[in-house]
Image (cartoon, grey):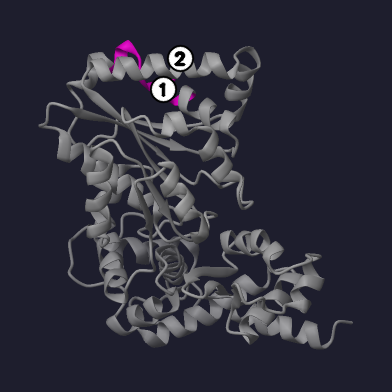
Amino acid sequence: MRGDLTMSFEEAERIKREVWRLTCDPFPDVPPVDPEKVASFFVGRRSEINMTLSTLYRGDNVLVRGTWGIGKTAFILTTLHRLQQKTVSNYRKVLPIYIMDFRGGSVDEFYQTILYSLTRVVKKSVWDRLKFIRPQEVTAIVSIPPASLQARWKTEGRSSVLEQIEGFMRRVEKKHYRLVIALDDLDKTAMQQGVINAMFHDSLHLLRDRRCAFILTSRAIARLDDLEISHLGIADSILPLMPMKGERLREMTISQLNYVRREFRDDAFPFTEDAVDEIVEKSMGIPRVLNSLCRKTLDIAAQQGYTKINSTCFENCFHKLQDNLSIRIPPEIKCILFYALERDGFLVSSKEETLEEVLALTGASTVHELLPYFDRLVQANYLVRAERADGISYKVAPGREKAAMEGRKLVQSPD
């Protein structure tokens, strides 16, 4: 190991390529939209996947709930990959569709999205090639362009759209296929409590149609809404993805490294075991936090000329990471991070917590009004959200500790 120099970009890339034997970045911020690739390094959650497969195959819906970064997209893609493999030899096959970039929250936007996807997928050319599809291939990955939906909706009312959806579903049924539609992050732009439930309620006839099973992911659905969702028949299974255990995160680290290594290894090189232990502990069970820490540590270590990353190297890289991140954080965010660090996280629960300082900074009137704001900080990787038995916890994300301490100085000396 060196660690005493700042390397050029070319030299840092040489270390990654020739010393660490990596062909590309093993830790992307978001998973690739490639079910076969994701399934190849996905680890854990076996019982959850098996339960989801059984539910979808009989035509029922699954709602997957979990915080930002918990691995909902990777879970969906792996499930679709397994679903296609599981049903390839059966008479009644599955036509899976993965829908990205849902940008709505109303029932009309929901119907628009489904119709657009079916229009793209259920065509004669699709049927002509279905028999040649590989067992592991997800038939369609659809990205929704808002402009296309809006233009079409101006000339077609809801009844016309529903008739067209029904026509497509009949065509699918005649070919002995069941539709499985995965709609990911359906509340990405509609975080307000109750908006998604209202959309569910207004689209019951489609959600209850057993010719089409849905796997839906959401962050904003509250636990108190579970009973209503089950009672309405929206989802047969409501599956919360919990933080992953440390051993699974270690396996994930090795699996992702092996996917881009020139040679297979059974360890996490260039990370040593003690470095992996520290990274896993800081990740709080959140796969995306793990990926972010590993990726940024690799970059900094290569720039510093390290050839192996042990606990000492990781500590040095982590301090450098905090310096890099702190520079770009606005003062008001640093103050909020300080209050979160001081309290060991914000807890939003039935027992109303007093957060006068944060309310004053954000202009919110109540703690529950802060939820959308906190969730935006989670998406920006300032906070980490976790559901607990007594409420929702928001803690300072790894790498933001220095910014939080700088927030302390701002709070104590606001001028």
Say if mark 2 contacts mark 1, CB within 8 Å: yes
Whether residue 102 is visible, yes or no, is no
Name above or below for residue 219 compared with residue 321: above
Q: Quadrant of residue 369?
A: bottom right
Q: Which is nearer the N-term, disc 2 or disc 1?
A: 1
| Amino acid on which the number 1 mark rests in the picture | Leu
The residue mark sitting in front, 2 or 1, is 2
369 relative position to 33: left or right: right
Q: Position of residue 187 (x, y in %)?
A: 55, 46
Residue plotted at (40% across, 52% down): 64
Please, what is the three-letter code of the amino acid marked with disc 2?
A: Gln
Seen from this angle, which residue lies furthest left? Answer: 89
Task: Give coordinates of residue 302: x percent, y percent.
Answer: 42, 70
Residue at 48% from the left image edge and 23% from the top image edge: 116
User: What residue does disc 1 label?
Assistant: 118
* x and y percentages locating residue 253 in the rendered image: 31, 67
Please name whichever residue, 130 or 209, is drawn nearer the observer in this view of the structure.
209
Q: Main secondary structure of the magenta part?
A: helix
- Residue under label 2: 164
Q: Quadrant of residue 261?
A: bottom left
Split into 4 quadrants, where in the image is the N terminus? Answer: bottom left
Q: Is residue 169 magenta?
A: no
Distance Cα–Cα, label 2 vs label 1: 9 Å
Q: How many marks?
A: 2
Task: Pick the residue in front: 17 or 409.
Answer: 409
Left or right? Give the position of 188 relative to 367.
left
Q: Secondary structure at mark 1?
A: helix
Q: Position of residue 9 (x, y in %)?
A: 49, 62
